[in-house]
Image (cartoon, rainbow, N blue to C red):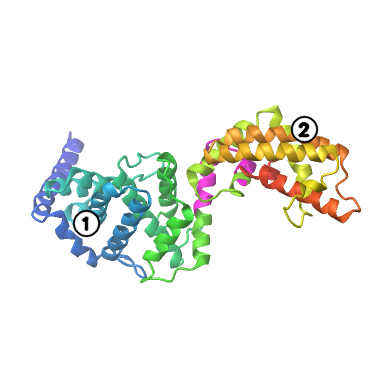
Amino acid sequence: PEVRQGFERVLAARLADAKFFWQVDRKTPLEGYVEKLKGIVFQEALGTMHAKTARIVDLAVMLAKELGWEEDLSVVQRAAKLAKADLVTNMVYEFPELQGVMGREYALRSGEPPAVAKAIYEHYLPRFAGDELPETVPGMIVSIADKMDSIAGCFAVGLIPTGSQDPYALRRQALGIIQIILTKQLDLPLTSLIHWAQAGLADQVEATPQTAKQIGEFFLGRLRGILTGEGIRYDVIDAVLAVESDRLPDLMARCQAVTRALDSEGMARLLVACERVANLAAKADDRRVDPGLLAESAEKELYQVYRQVNDKVTKKLAAADYQGALAELVHLSGPIDAFFDQVLVMVEDEDLRRNRLALLGILTDLLTCVADLRLIVT
């Protein structure tokens, strides 16, 4: 009983504090706290939380426009402006784990639209692995903008995670951005996102191409972990990244298509054919094939099949049907085998040799349109 009474006294005191903070905080509308963010330093070289808020607003507005969500622009802008305001309230100062939660509650009681209040809460999501993701468009956009600003800023001033050192939780924030983009299927190129975030930091720090490259590699490192967790082989990831590393939903779709295709017998033959083609294609100086120089029936047949498959694959790629594109590529296996069985590529005649190498060159380009199949380990 004594232990219980002790806990009850402590809990009662904490609840009394919380009630007092709640009453005091509500005397000022949430917007009234924004100016006080000038008193909180985000990072010495990157300025205050007030400066960070301004960057979040600009980046969030740009993302909304780029993603075609102009109808949400006013909510995005307002939520971004108020997103960090609760950090200077008494409640969050005493109970830091309530950041975002109190922002939502104070926003509602300050007369802000429910959509703005929800986005304020959601912009902290996901807070940890397996946590919920933002449900609303404004929540997603402000979340990405906030996290991306932190990552770009910290990389610019050399605060790059190493080993177990990650004081600004950049790994978690990068994973959060990736999970939002993948789950919500956002058409948001990684290089563009990095560029926009760096541009917003121009007044504080110098953005360099080298830093942008480091940020890109940092994201792809986190992405590899996610893909591996989905059961995708490392060589499939390498093969896809060699072709597409910017649009994450597209990258995931390609990985899944190649993974499924690897179970088929036709893909095994195609991988062998691809390796035979690539070995000689490396000697090709150009990709101009002269149909008039195709002398042997096997090379004529291969060229005709190439043109047919190329047309079909182009349509499949335009529809993001990567599994269908791979299925079309399988039709090249037989003609490629026949070509190598019946045609001598490195003939003495220079024109014939150049033309055959060019044919192998365009075949290699086609065979690596979904993923660089040369990197698949057989």
Q: Residue at x 71, y 28 (%)?
A: 265
Q: Where residue 121 sits in the image (x, y, percent)? A: 26, 46
Residue placed under numbered mark 1 in the picture = 85
Where is residue 27, by image quadrant? bottom left
Residue 370 pos. (x, y %): 61, 42
Q: Residue furthest front?
A: 292
Secondary structure state at the residue bearing disc 1: helix
Instruction: Give, as a single range, the part of the protein colored magenta.
Output: 219-238
Q: Nearer the viewer, residue 335 or 76?
A: 335
Give the side of residue 50 with respect to residue 363, left or right.
left
Name the dominant secondary structure of the magenta segment.
helix
- Circle nearer the viewer, 2 or 1: 2
Of all residues, the one furthest to the right in this rendering is 348
Instruction: Identify which amino acid the numbered label 1 is placed on.
Output: Ala
Q: Is residue 222 magenta?
A: yes
| Foreground pick, 49 / 239 | 239
Query: Looking at the picture, does residue 335 appear above or below residue 63?
Result: above
Which residue is at a point 37% across and 49% down the rendered structure image?
67
Residue 44 drawn at (x, y percent): 35, 69
**Magenta stretch: residue 172 in it?**
no
Q: Is residue 301 left or right of residue 140?
A: right
- Up the image or down, 323 lies above or below 368; here it is above
Compare residues 248 and 168 and report the one nearer the observer.
248
Q: Position of residue 237 (x, y in %)?
A: 60, 43
Determine whether, in the image, residue 288 is placed left or right of residue 122: right
Q: CA distance from mark 2 to mark 1?
A: 65 Å
Instruction: Check disc 2 and give the amino acid type.
Output: Gly
Write down the residue under mark 2: 334
Which element type, helix, strand or loop, lies under badge 2?
helix
